[in-house]
Amino acid sequence: MTKKIGTIIGLVLVAVGAVAMWFCKIPAAEIGAFAVTMFGAGLACANLYNGAEKKNWLTIVGIAAVGIGSFVLGFFGLISSDTMVSMISMIIGIVVIIAGIISTAVGTKLAKKKEA
């Protein structure tokens, strides 16, 4: 659990930044929320990479998916003014983040199984 605490904090920061962008309509606050989202994405990706004991292509793809999903979550939350576009982009971002976390876990388990 102590290995995963950085990933959890990073994903919480991504969520906090996305929610802040949803509710704040002041341009400076939206930029700050985007920065928090991207900082959380970087923290989560770095800890996922360092926490993976065996790295293979599936682990790398999963980490990239977490970064891309966080970017989609933050960027389209920042630029969209339509509620429906914001909700669809947030759903897509969350799904990509979850898929990235699952593929990272599966990739690590497959690498361990292949080695044994």
Image (tube, helix red, strand yellow):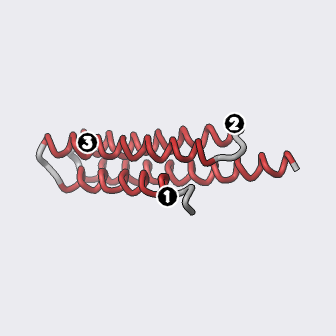
**Residue wearing tag 2:** 57
Residue at 14% in and 41% down: 28
Number of marks in the image?
3
Amino acid type, callout 2: Trp
Amino acid type, callout 3: Leu
Q: Quadrant of the N terminus?
A: bottom right
Kindly identify which numbered label has been placed on residue 93: none
Alpha-carbon span between mark 2 and mark 3: 31 Å
Q: Position of residue 62 (x, y in %)?
A: 59, 43
Q: Report the side of 6 relative to 55 (left or right).
A: left
Dot 2 or dot 3, earlier in sequence = 2
Amino acid type, callout 1: Ile
Q: Position of residue 35 (x, y in %)?
A: 29, 40
Q: Residues within 10 Å of mark 3 (few under 14, many from 20)?
A: many
Q: Position of residue 36 (x, y in %)?
A: 30, 45
Looking at this rendering, what residue extends furthest in the left direction? 26
**Residue wearing tag 3:** 78
Q: Residues within 10 Å of mark 1 (few under 14, many from 20)?
A: few
In the image, 71 versus 37, the foreground residue is 37
**Residue wearing tag 1:** 5
Looking at this rendering, what residue extends furthest in the front direction? 2
Residue at 56% in and 42% down: 63
In the image, 82 versus 32, the foreground residue is 32
Circle 3: element type: helix
Rendered view: 46 above or below 102: above
Residue at 42% in and 44% down: 41
